[in-house]
Structures are given as C-alpha cells and as structure tokens.
Image (tube, rainbow, N blue to C red):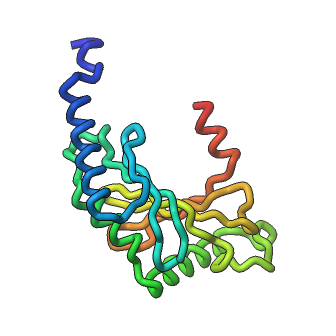
Amino acid sequence: MGEAATRPTWQSFLMTESVLNDLLRRVTESGLLDDAQIDEDSVIGAGHLDAAGVEVEVDLDPELDEDDEPDLDAIMTGLKDILSVSEDRWRAIVEEVASDIEDALDDDELDADVDLRTDLEAIGVGVFADAIIVVFAGETSFPDALVHVQLTPELEVEDIEIIGDDDEDDDDED
C-alpha cells in the first residue's frame, strides 16, 4: 500500500467538493448566512445571533477528515438553533459561562469591577454535526484572549476554554 494509499484520490476530492457545494447550497437557500462561501474544508459566512443582537462570523465544519459521512442535516439544524436561540436560553448560557469562569479564576485574575455577563460578546460560531462552539470576546475582562464555549446540539454548555494570544502562538509552532 505504502505512500499511494495515503494520498488523496480524485474520488475523495470530488466527494469533498460535492459535500461542501451541497452545504453551501443549503445555507444559501436557508438565508441564514450572508456572504456564504466555501473556505478550504468548511462553509463560512456572517450570521445574526438574534438573542444577543450581534453579527457573528460563522464556520460550518462538516469534518471531512472523519471516516463517517457528514451529517449536513445536523449542521443545518445546529446553525438554525444557535442563530434563533431564545433570549431566555441565551441569558442562561451567558450566566453559566460567566459563573463558571468566576468560580474557576482567582479573585486577582479577574477585575472585580467587570461583570462578565455584560462584558462577554459573541463574535463567532462554529457548527459541527455534534457540537456548537460560540466564541466570545471580553474587551475588558480578557483583552488578549477569547472564550470558546462548546455547546451540545441541545444548546447546553459542555466546555469552556479561555484561549489567549500565547496559546495560539504555541499552536502555530507545533
């Protein structure tokens, strides 16, 4: 088998193109994103997160490197669900994220005058078949970092990670 078995084939390339074109078509027809386009292995565009009242960059990732057939229906459902999340559910997500961060950080690591509930602003959304990532910027609380919040398809908080500029530099070097 050797080296030839690890090279992408025309068939896999065409399947990738087909999946991305199908996802782009679905997104365009849905009207959920503005300026939707294919970017490498995902579909990107701008969306309006109604409950937060902000425009966000959206990245729909069908995870083409996985062995399973991409679940485009789940990705489209996740996109619709996060962009149209109710204000009550959105406030509950932000509250849980803020509380978890406050509990995890020492008092001296977070400015006591800053309320995370109003400082954190959604700037991006990544949608996968089995998860949604919301990226928050905290202009005052985390000026050099972003807060990545992983949600389940049911929009329950699953994981929170604060990623600073230093962390991204480390990833680029690997």
Q: Is residue 133 left or right of residue 15?
A: right
Residue occupying image coordinates x 77% and y 73%: 107
68 above or below 145? above
At x 42%, y 41%, the residue is: 39
Question: Residue 121 location, x and y as percent?
Answer: 61, 70
Give the quarter of the image for residue 151: bottom left
Residue nearest the observer in this picture, 2 or 56: 56
Q: Quadrant of the C terminus?
A: top right
Between 70 and 123, the residue placed more toward the observer is 123
Q: Horizontal and vertical percent for residue 109?
A: 77, 66
- 27, above or below 102, in the image: above
- Say which quadrant the N terminus sits in: top left
Left or right? Give the position of 86 relative to 28: right
Residue visible at 28% across and 20% down in the picture:
6
Q: Judge left or right: residue 26 versus residue 168.
A: left
Percent from the top left, x then y, of residue 57? 50, 57
Nearer-the-camera pick, 21 or 166: 21
Q: Is residue 95 above or below residue 25?
A: below
Residue at 62%, 31% in the rendered image: 173
Q: Nearer the viewer, residue 50 or 129?
A: 50
Q: How many callouts does the rendering have?
A: 0
Instruction: Please identify the residue farthest to the bottom as the structure is shown.
Output: 88
In percent of width and height, residue 77 lies at 28, 66
**Image-quadrant location for residue 100:** bottom right
